[in-house]
Amino acid sequence: MQVGIIGISEKTAKEFAESVLETNNLELSGFYDCNCSGMIGKDIYGKKVDGDILELFAAADVVVDFSNHRDKSRELILASEMETKYIIVGEYEKDKLVHIVEDKGFVKFFNNVDEIIELLKQ
């Protein structure tokens, strides 16, 4: 399974990327971060951090979002249109988003990185 990560500048995102690398049948497909992070173009685990979120969703079977920006509408639209599973780490705007996406089956909310790895291993 190809795993893309949004918000790779976050410490927990890097820890998650290491867990993906250590898990059979999971591969890192790429990273996305905002221009303000200073991460664009940097090499992490053999992949360049990109500023093109569309490319990230196209290459991944699942995208895990560690970013701390509140508006996830662009990501939700991409996940829906591209039929890519999308996991939001944390509780950002969950109350506002869950009614929009809960019946779609492609969006999940998690707080624990180990639980995400367990889900992806299934």
Image: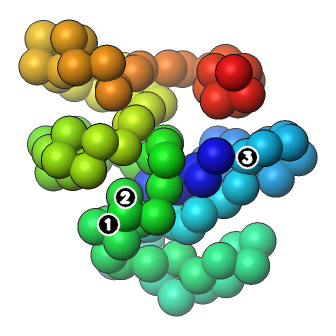
The reply to whether dot 3 and dot 1 touch (C-beta < 8 Å) is no
* Residue positioned 37% across, 63% down in the render: 58
- Of badges 2 and 1, nearer the viewer stands 2
Residue 116 x, y percent position in the rendering: 62, 26
The reply to whether dot 2 and dot 1 touch (C-beta < 8 Å) is yes
Q: Earlier in the sequence, mark 2 or mark 3?
A: 3
Which color scheme did the rendering employ for the protein?
rainbow
Q: Which residue is mark 3?
A: 26
- Of badges 3 and 1, nearer the viewer stands 3
The residues bearing labels 2 and 3 have C-alpha atoms spaced at a distance of 16 Å
The residues bearing labels 3 and 1 have C-alpha atoms spaced at a distance of 20 Å
Q: Earlier in the sequence, mark 3 or mark 1?
A: 3
Mark 2: amino acid: Phe
Q: Secondary structure at mark 3?
A: loop
In the rendered image, the vertical position of residue 33 relative to residue 87, given as above or below: below
Q: Which residue is mark 1?
A: 53
Residue 67 x, y percent position in the rendering: 40, 48
Q: Which residue is mark 2?
A: 57
Q: Is residue 41 left or right of residue 58?
A: right
Q: Is residue 109 left or right of residue 21?
A: left
Q: How many marks?
A: 3
| Between 22 and 11, the one nearer to me in the picture | 22
* Residue positioned 50% across, 20% down in the render: 110
Q: Residues within 10 Å of mark 2 (few under 14, many from 20)?
A: many
* Residue positioned 67% across, 83% down in the render: 43
In the rendered image, the vertical position of residue 86 relative to residue 122, given as above or below: below
Q: Which mark is residue 108?
A: none
In the rendered image, the vertical position of residue 87 relative to residue 33, given as above or below: above
Residue 122 x, y percent position in the rendering: 69, 21
Mark 3: amino acid: Leu
